[in-house]
Amino acid sequence: MEKLKERWGISSNWQLVIIFIVFGITGSLSAKLAEPLTHLIGLDQEHISGWIYWPVRILLIFPIYQLLLVFFGWMFGQFNFFWTFEKKMFRRLGFARFFPDEEH
């Protein structure tokens, strides 16, 4: 755990526990919220091939997850950690111009 705390730049075990809780809540809730959204846009698992349904559902989960991660990070007092985490992830996905690196 010490390596993870050092890598993430956090100091306490309590902060690490809170971060894990936020990741857990966010993952579960985003997967749960994607189901009604797929129905809302007319995708029903019984009537559409899994080859279409699951990629679309995963594509829906991704932005929901990103928004919820920052929201729950803020709710649990870890906004700075999760905002930095999001910016780093989006830079790696090729969106660097939208999230410039403040360090340089």
Image (cartoon, rainbow, N blue to C red):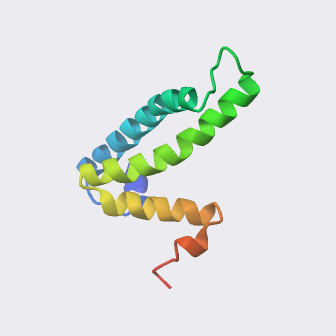
Task: Give coordinates of residue 61: x percent, y percent.
Answer: 54, 39
- Residue 6 seen in the figure: no
Residue at coordinates 61% horizontally, 37% vertically from top-left? 58
Q: Give the quadrant of residue 43.
A: top right
Residue 8: percent from left, percent from top: 41, 59
Residue at the extreme top of the image, as rendered: 46
61 or 17, nearer to the observer: 61
Q: At which x and y percent is residue 6?
A: 39, 61
Query: For the image shown, how many numbered marks are present on the structure?
Result: 0
- Residue at point 59%, 33% (across, down): 41
- Is residue 59 visible in the rendered structure shown here? yes
User: Image point 46% across, 37% down: which residue?
Assistant: 30
Name the residue located 32 percent from the left edge and 47 percent from the top edge. Answer: 72
Relative horizontal placement of residue 39, taking residue 2 as reference (left or right) = right
In this rendering, would 50 be left or right of 36? right
Closest to the observer, 72 or 15:
72
Looking at the image, is 63 positioned above or below residue 9? above
Q: Choose top left, top right, bottom left or bottom right for residue 20.
A: top left
Q: Position of residue 25 (x, y in %)?
A: 36, 36
Q: Is residue 12 left or right of residue 93?
A: left
